[in-house]
Image (spheres, rainbow, N blue to C red):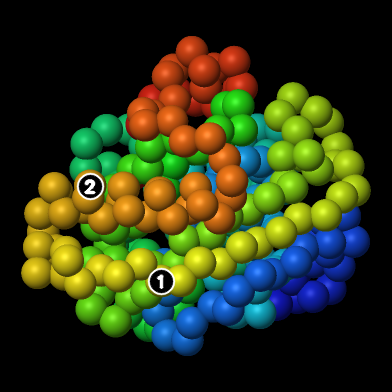
Amino acid sequence: MYWLIKYVLLGPLVHWVTRPRLIGKLPAGPVVFAPNHLSEIDSLVVCAALSRRVTFVAKSDYFARGSLRGRLYGTLCRVTGQIPIERSGAGSADAALEGARGTLCEGGVWVIYPEGTRSPDGRLYRGRTGAMRVALSVPDAAVVPVGLRGTREIDPPGHRGWRRGRTEVHLGDPIDLSPWRHRADDPEAWREATDALMAAIQKLSGQEYVDRHPTADELQRRGETPDSPTP
């Protein structure tokens, strides 16, 4: 179903609207694909740009939205094998991160937005540590920083419908994880590695960096649930 949607049912429309350009090369083997997050259309652009199958961790409320658009999005997540993540409190994301670890152990590509949620204003915010928490536990995994450009103009916050434009998916060199490999269970190592990842993403995306997470007020103004973002 993933390939049917990518090449027949939805992918051609996404290609026509977004005209994605892939800059850089995705390595073989298990990959943590870590982009900035500007727009709801980001995930579709990533799928359209990459030739390999990708797996996302998607917030569980996306699977259960009541609107027609929400139901369609939830169905798309389910039939393409995406992993739902609970955001209710401490430890609630562990099952989803374990599922992501399984994807990597099978040699797959796992996509995670380190910011944990879409940027409320186009700036790049401090990363959460889930990506590195998983990556450091999978010895062969490569962590690829990614800068998405142009998606916010095609799908602006608060605007109904897409505007045709061009997008770019900039792939950086994999992060050198050797300084932290021997500290795979250390939260301080997760934080240090995540900060290095965000610095690499910032260079690729060209965004202004904000060394904090978005506030609840900022997310509410953009329409995002403010509590318990993706880790």
**Residue 217 locus on image (x, y percent):** 48, 13
Residue 96 visible at all: no
**The N terminus lies in quadrant:** bottom right
Residue depicted at x 40% and y 79%: 30
**42 to the left or right of 85:** right
| Foreground pick, 230 / 173 | 173
Q: Separation of disc 2 and disc 1 at Cα?
A: 17 Å
| 113 lies above or below 181 | above
| Foreground pick, 123 / 190 | 123
| Foreground pick, 198 / 85 | 198
Residue depicted at x 37% and y 31%: 211
Q: Amino acid at mark 2?
A: Arg
Q: Amino acid at mark 1?
A: Pro
Q: Which residue is mark 2?
A: 191
Q: Which residue is mark 1?
A: 174
> Which of the 4 quarters of the picture holds residue 45?
bottom right
Residue depicted at x 83% and y 31%: 160
Crowding near pointer 2: few (<14 within 10 Å), some, many (20+)?
A: some
Secondary structure type for disc 1: loop
| 225 lies above or below 79 | above
Q: How many marks?
A: 2
**Residue 21 locus on image (x, y percent):** 75, 66
Crowding near pointer 1: few (<14 within 10 Å), some, many (20+)?
A: some
Secondary structure type for disc 2: helix
**Residue 99 locus on image (x, y percent):** 35, 64
Q: Earlier in the sequence, mark 2 or mark 1?
A: 1
**Residue 54 locus on image (x, y percent):** 55, 70
**38 to the left or right of 141:** right
| 131 lies above or below 222 | below
